[in-house]
Amino acid sequence: MIGTTSLSSPNLQTDETLSFSETVRTRRSYRGFLSTPIPKSTLISVLEDAQRAPSNCNTQPWNVHIVSGSKLAELSKAILTKNDTGHYTPDFTFDMNHFYGVYGIRKDAQGKAYYEAMEVARDDKAARHRAAAHNYSFFNAPHVALLFMPSFGDNVRVASDIGMYAQTFLLALAARGLGGIPQTSLGFFAETIREILGISEDQKMLFGISFGYPDEHAPGNRMKMDRVAIGDSVTFHY
Ligand SMILES: Cc1cc2nc3c(=O)[nH]c(=O)nc-3n(C[C@H](O)[C@H](O)[C@H](O)COP(=O)(O)O)c2cc1C
């Protein structure tokens, strides 16, 4: 199910994009980036693509905060401190123990692949904490997109809209030879992030996406997650 090959991201000229099929097959979560910032014009074209995402009743509920430079360093420092003291302030619950059956098995396989890539022993708690904390230095990415949303009812519909936006954003990056990683873990510090960026309390944070130029040699990029067969996910009815 899991390989450990290091994939290389395609070299593209400015304004050139991959075909749809290449884009979908190339996209993966990167856990290591070069510090080189993305040119503003490229970032705007990614955001313009992402803005085309569908949403319930075209409400377009995504409120996206892109953080770079010294503000990103400030954010990382604050979150790493809160993480070390276990001071979590998520807007939405997340409990890995809820993943039952095959979902738990897939979750465990993903965790195992990451810690193997990072050469961290399963029973080395301190090393696991350090490896997980790379989420909070944004895996060295020069940018993060923090996805905030208004709160409506049980929030399930709004959250699905944010998911639509996020995948369009990730594919827009992949099409340009860039990379990103969606991170629920950033949402564990929603309150801290709101405080530092001056975001109002009525905006709830679902997750963030660190992004930039993938560092193909970073240990975190040694893993490649596979998928179950279509037959395990899709049922045809006639
Ligand atoms: C909404 C969402 C949140 C995620 N949160 C994290 C995270 O906090 N940290 C992390 O390392 N990976 C995170 N991931 C990445 C998943 O582990 C990854 O998408 C999955 O293993 C499949 O691998 P691939 O994206 O490389 O195809 C998240 C993915 C999604 C869709």
Image (cartoon, rainbow, N blue to C red):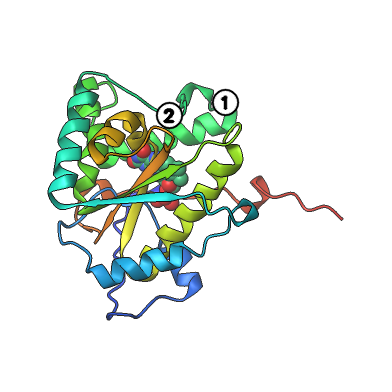
**Relative to 91, residue 71 above or below:** below
Report the residue at 64% width, 54% height from top: 57
Check disc 1: other Cα within 10 Å, few if <14, some if 14-19, many if 20+: few
Where 229 sits versus 155, above or below? Answer: below
For residue 198, side relative to residue 18 (left or right): left
Ligand 1 shows up in the quarter that is top left
Q: Secondary structure at mark 1?
A: loop
Quadrant of the image occupied by residue 27: bottom left
Q: Closest to the observer: 120 or 82?
A: 82
Q: Position of residue 184 (x, y in %)?
A: 39, 37
Q: Disc 2 and disc 1: Cα gap in Å?
A: 23 Å
The circle drawn on residue 91 is 2
Instruction: Look at label 1 and name its amino acid.
Output: Tyr
From the image, tell me which residue sits under label 1. Answer: 100
**Ligand 1 has an atom within 8 Å of the beta carbon of the residue at disc 2:** no
Q: Is residue 95 left or right of residue 86?
A: right
